[in-house]
Image (spheres, coloured by chain):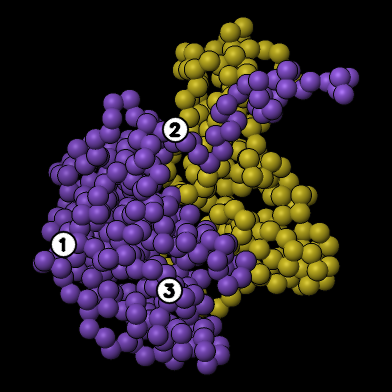
Chain colours: A yellow, B purple
Amino acid sequence: MTTATAGTTTRVDAAALAREIACRVTDPEMPMLTLEDLGVLRDVEVDDERVVVTITPTYSGCPAMATMRDDLVHSLRDHGFGDVEVKVSLHPAWSSDWISERGRRALTDHGLSAPGPAPRHDGPVMLNLRPTRRALSCPRCGSRDVDLTSEFGPTACKAMYRCTACLEPFEHVKEI
Amino acid sequence: MSHVHDHDADHESVYDGLTGGDDSQWAFGTDFEDPLAGVDTTIPDGVDARTLADYCLMLGDDALVYSHRLSEWTSRAPDLEEDIALANVALDLLGQARLLLARAAAADASLVPDLPEGSPVPPEDALAFFRDESAFRNVRFVEPDNGDFAETIARLLVFSTYRLALLQRLASSRDAVLSAIAGKGVKEVTYHRDYAGRWFLTLAQGTEESRRRLVAGLALVWPLHDELFRTTPVERSAAEQGVGVDPAAVADEVDVLLEQVFSVSGVERPEVPPTGAVNGGMGREGRHTEAMGHLLAQMQVVARAHPMGRW
């Protein structure tokens, strides 16, 4: 852990340090993912002594957003940045496509299934009365023989699946 | 027992050790920071602030009231998956409501009820918890009791089809905030509509009993359906100013989509007369059904008892 603080570094270093600290903050529900890997962290700027962090919510009602803000503020404060503002950016809306490659690997390593490409919403949204088909493999045993249990899961961003080979349930981060 | 270490003497509270004296660590999910922090809420040129605010209230109240209704299924749904699904739908709508009510308050602060000086209640909560029934602008469609699961699915299908049609058009609203909220909402409500459509088909083609309940549920839901597409002066002006959508303009599209589900499911469109106006008004004018007062009483009672409360 670095011992540098904002007060003892130059402005350029402070900006780099603030970014580095913000990039290490993890998602409260999926702690294997940093906010950067999740794509929620949009920008970190240092203006004089003030750090301005911009985040984009994953879902409109995601209750983890407040914790993300708190965690960002606390991590930065712990490293000497006393004045931290967390801003919200609503446009463009968050997409699961923003989850980084490293984030996707981290999800799989922790038994979660990473999202495929997000659906495009350029034209009218088609009604889909058939069960959603995704080409997934079980994050535990690798079998492609999986069943969708529910399009909604324990957090807003997940669907629930069951592997019919190893019989274990698993969570899939939804395409959105 | 005098050798037993007195733990109580070491700590003021057993929780001190967990938080390290940092209370904010307990704020999970209860933080009331501004959901529009840092968002530019300037009113676009040529747009009347009050019209924009009133229009946002309508969409926000639809989401808020329906979210509350759907959340009543939590712990009572037919199985765990449906329990979680309906709670997720409710949560998405609550998130949309929070943003829309915050947008309404930012556009015209005079809409926000007065609270005692020093009250920490943020504007969107003041709107949700401290307005009386007649100030709510939601359609009556979202108010009635859930009924059984089949009735809930019938209502959710109609509502999510309607809302998705509105949100898709609103994504190009001249108000950048409303446009962003709608753009996000489209992604969420797409899941809601698919969920309701699949269950509609499943119940229609399931057992005799599931079909009977679905047909009965749809008939109960239908009398308030026409009101969704009735244009109020606020919606007309919001549409003319390029920030809102005239609901009558989505009626055909919604109808085609519903017809698609009905025909695949082999269910006839109900032949029931629409519920009329009350003293010349409907939900958008603050005239609600009997169910609304009960719903608000439950939703608002704790907040109203503690206007100075921190949560």
Does residue A142 sit above or below B224 in this rendering? above
Q: Which of marks 3 and 1 is nearer the N terminus?
A: 3
Q: Position of residue B91 (x, y in %)?
A: 48, 54
As rendered, which of B185 and B215 lies closer to the eye? B215
Mark 1 sits on what residue?
B232
Splitting the image into 4 quarters, where does residue B255 fall? Answer: bottom left
Mark 3 sits on what residue?
B147
Closer to the eye: label 2 or 1: 2
Residue at 63% in and 17% down:
A79
As rendered, which of B174 and A30 lies closer to the eye? A30
Marks 3 and 1 on same chain: yes
What crowding class fits label 3: few (fewer than 14 Cα within 10 Å), some (14-19), or many (20 or more)?
few
As rendered, which of B268 and B112 lies closer to the eye? B112
Q: Are marks 3 and 2 in contact (CB under 8 Å)?
A: no
Q: Are marks 2 and 1 in contact (CB under 8 Å)?
A: no
Mark 2 sits on what residue?
B310
Q: Position of residue B89 (x, y in %)?
A: 48, 60
* Cα–Cα span, label 3 and label 2: 34 Å
Secondary element at tag 1: loop
Marks 3 and 2 on same chain: yes
What crowding class fits label 2: few (fewer than 14 Cα within 10 Å), some (14-19), or many (20 or more)?
few
Marks 2 and 1 on same chain: yes
The amino acid on which the numbered mark 2 sits, given as a three-letter code, is Arg
- The chain letter under disc 3 is B
Secondary element at tag 3: loop
